[in-house]
Image (cartoon, grey):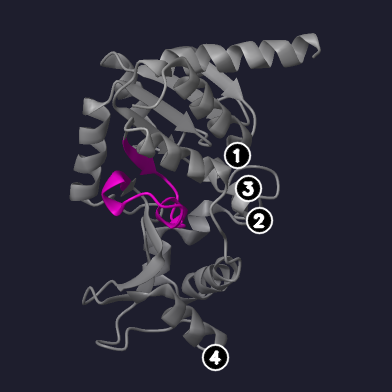
Amino acid sequence: MDVAGQAAADALERAGGLLAGAERVVVFSGAGVSTDSGIPDFRSPGGLWSRYDPRELGFRRYVSDPGTRRLAWRLRRELHRLEARPNPAHLACVRLAEAGRLAGVITQNIDGLHTDAGLPAELVCEVHGTGRQFVCLACGERGPMGEAVARVEAGEEDPACLTCGGIIKAATVSFGQNIPADVWARAEALTAACDAFVAVGSSLVVQPAAGLPVRASRQGATLVIVNREPTPLDDLADAVLHGEAGTLLPALVSAALRARPQR
């Protein structure tokens, strides 16, 4: 093993040692957790925001502009066709739960892959909503996203609610749209109760979710950051691992469980 490889291995073992004594680990997952499942992230070269200005898809424009809705539905159809499956990063969270050490996963992702991997719904807090459903902005009617996408595939560029005729959109939190109060309260409660906070696959720039690791650190929880690129919070963390979530998160969980075996 070369010097760089040995340094990376040492950093991984040190991070695992920091997590070994944690009883209430919160994993905070971003888009980098799902890239190994074939879901493109937003900010990296070739990501969604390199193709579209995020303001073009903001909530206010979605509501006011049929052209924005047509674009959003084309993108939603594209993502729906991916048929993504959980990858080793999602399965690492399940392993942590099976070891009795996971308090919960707070995820910025809308793909539902954490539950597909086997995590109980009560352990998953989707702060940015879910792309698995659509919701009517007028009457609140919900349904499977597949039904709405099928209408788009059939030629409806901007499908309306079949119950009231209102505007429908993915049941996600768009730019300019507030996180539901009950969901945010749950994310804050998980953060307040954790003794270790692992931020993985997130650029840690999207607020207010990016404030959660700061809060965890300030209350004394161990903070570990796993991300391909540096983040604005690296200097705050107790350990930082740079690389792919699908490789590093399973290795980190293994290191933590080796240091303190499963109960």
- Amino acid bearing label 2: Arg
Q: Position of residue 9 (x, y in %)?
A: 65, 16
N-terminal of the pair, mark 4 or mark 2, is 2
Q: Position of residue 143 (x, y in %)?
A: 33, 76
Residue found 54% across the figure and 18% down from its top:
240
114 in magenta: yes
The residue mark sitting in front, 4 or 2, is 4
Secondary structure under the numbered disc 1 in the rendered image:
helix
| Mark positioned earlier in the residue sequence (1 or 2) | 2
- Measured in 3D between alpha carbons, the distance from the residue under mark 2 to the one under mark 3, in whole angstroms, is 20 Å
Q: Residues within 10 Å of mark 1 (few under 14, many from 20)?
A: many
Task: From the image, state whether disc 3 or disc 4 is nearer to you.
Answer: 3
Looking at the rendered structure, which numbered label has been put on residue 61? none
Mark 4 sits on what residue? 154
Labels 4, 1: front one:
1
Q: Earlier in the sequence, mark 2 or mark 3?
A: 3
**Number of other residues with Cα within 10 Å of mark 4, as a class: few under 14, some 14 to 19, many 20 or more:** few
Q: Which residue is mark 1?
A: 246
Which residue is depicted at the point 25% across and 16% down? 219
SS at mark 2 in the image: helix
Magenta part of the chain? 103-124
Amino acid type, callout 3: Asp
Q: Which residue is mark 3?
A: 36
Side (left or right) of 115 relative to 52: left
**Between residues 121 and 166, which one lies in front from this camera angle?**
121
Between disc 4 and disc 1, whose residue precedes? Answer: 4
**Whole-percent x, y for residue 12 in the image:** 58, 18
Disc 2, disc 3: CB below 8 Å? no
Residue 155 in sight from this viewpoint: yes
Whole-angstrom CA distance, mark 1 to mark 3, is 6 Å
Query: Amino acid under label 1?
Result: Gly
